[in-house]
Amino acid sequence: MKSRRQFLGEASCAAIGSTPILSTLLNLTMANHAAAANGEAAGTRKALVCLYLGGGCDTFNFLIPMDQPGGYDEYAASRTNLAIPRSQLIPLNFSDSFGRTYGIHPSCPRIAEMFNGLGGDPAEKRLSLLANIGTLVEPIPDKEAYQQKLVDLPQALFSHRDQTEQWQTSVPQGMQVLTGWAGRCADVIHSRLNTEQTGGYYMPMNFSLSGNSTFQIGESEGQFVITSNGALTFTGANSSTPAHRAKQAAIGSTVESPIEDHYQNLFQRTHGQITANSIARGEDFQTHFDDPGSIDGINVEAVINAANFPDHSVGRNLAAAVRTIAIRDDLNLHRQTFFIEFGGWDHHSELLNTQGGMLAILDQALFAFQQCLEQLGLSDDVMTFTASDFGRTLRSNGQGTDHAWSANQMVLGGPVGGGEILGHFPSLAIDGPDDIGRGGRIFPRMSVDEYFCELLRWFGVSNGEMDTVLPNIRTFYDPYSSTNPVGFLA
């Protein structure tokens, strides 16, 4: 366990997919529980936070080779007018097996600090980077295999809608999939690890601060949609006004009291019960959310207020995630997932200035979030990871870049080894060995399945359950292996 070192710096419906009417996964779940040889006990508390960069972030202008002559010159030649001057990059204390060195976009000093070590202490690294990752049906050994069509490819590459769905479902074959991998995770572990969730209603383990997402929808489990101000209600976002409370009470009475007398149809009766439970669940959640109390004598509200979250939706939503993690005991949850989308990364024009400003917001928000976790002693219980539709072309279209494939991602938190760039960082040469054409589209060497599998192993999904959560995992990795697929865990 890492130290609780504090960061330096400035201190619709209430629920979607509630208690299932019928669970087609019941027998499968019971079988998986029986076979969970390495299943984790329910006593531990853990959370996974997905920060989705909607639109396709140009991450080859985020993580940049610095070695010269060599990597930087190749980068600058390909990116032309979009290249960031080498002198402006923030160096990372890392070199790969080829002696290659790297830097981070100048808008991200705090991300660089979390990578290099908090306060300059190399023992306090919290963040690692994953290079050259994307959706894959099967491994692609080289560029020629792609060109000669020797491998199966994800359906509708370079499409926002399709690639977003594939990142959230981890099923890239083009099949219609109605469940996401966090939803399927909840299907198999919620009842096993969140053992205190019993009775007439229970709290889902999946929380979305960005509306409904495929990512957290399972076959038997769903997501609890909240806002930065707390629970949603049938009359809109939460409000404490007397009129709002009266309206909520009236709706609750309407859906609950006539169940036995008037709802003779089984489905209608069950729907009424679920609706009433959803209202009660939202009210219970809001009570704890509004007053998160203290952890080991440290006031949660004071820590959040001092953390310098940016005045932006991603900052407000990450602050709300801290609150929701902090009240996990009140919610009787040993496991939680969070989905937060930060959109607007589809930079076909004006990449440099727009992306620079957005990266600065991301940098501040992630640092403030991790700062809160550190100060509250929650860092070892939370892993935050990024995802995005796809990467961008290396070649400029004049002012921006177009849809491509492979990209780079971040994973951070106390469980992360930190200070590593993992994976095969590609050649950034136009028409080079990793460019499949059309303006510098890089093909991925690391699959999203490998990425997600390591997150899920830490989270408590057993070897025997991994195939259910990630149907394609065995194409890339044996879930019974004694080594992790990527290697970012400490």
Image (cartoon, helix red, strand yellow):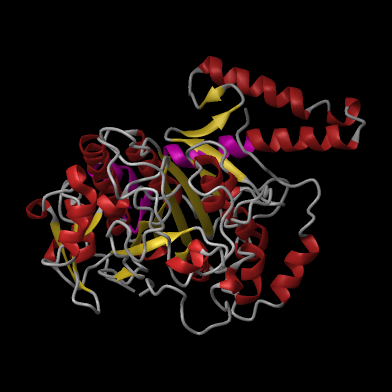
Left or right of 177 in this view: 42: left
Q: Which residues are magenta?
A: 280-307
Q: Residue at x 63, y 48 (%)?
A: 217
Q: Residue at x 66, y 36 (%)?
A: 278
Q: Is residue 12 above or below residue 97?
A: above
Q: Position of residue 100 (x, y in %)?
A: 19, 71
Q: Position of residue 382 (x, y in %)?
A: 41, 60
Q: Position of residue 247 (x, y in %)?
A: 61, 18
Q: Residue at x 76, y 71 (%)?
A: 31
Q: Position of residue 467 (x, y in %)?
A: 65, 69
Q: Principal SS element in the magenta part?
A: helix
Q: Nearer the viewer, residue 355 or 438?
A: 438
In what quadrant of the picture does the N terminus appear?
Answer: bottom left
Asked if one can make out residue 65 in the rendered structure from this viewpoint, the answer is no
Left or right of 340 in this view: 461: right
In what quadrant of the picture does the C terminus appear?
Answer: bottom left
State which quadrant residue 444 falls in. bottom left
Left or right of 198 in this view: 336: left
Q: Is residue 381 above or below residue 391?
A: below
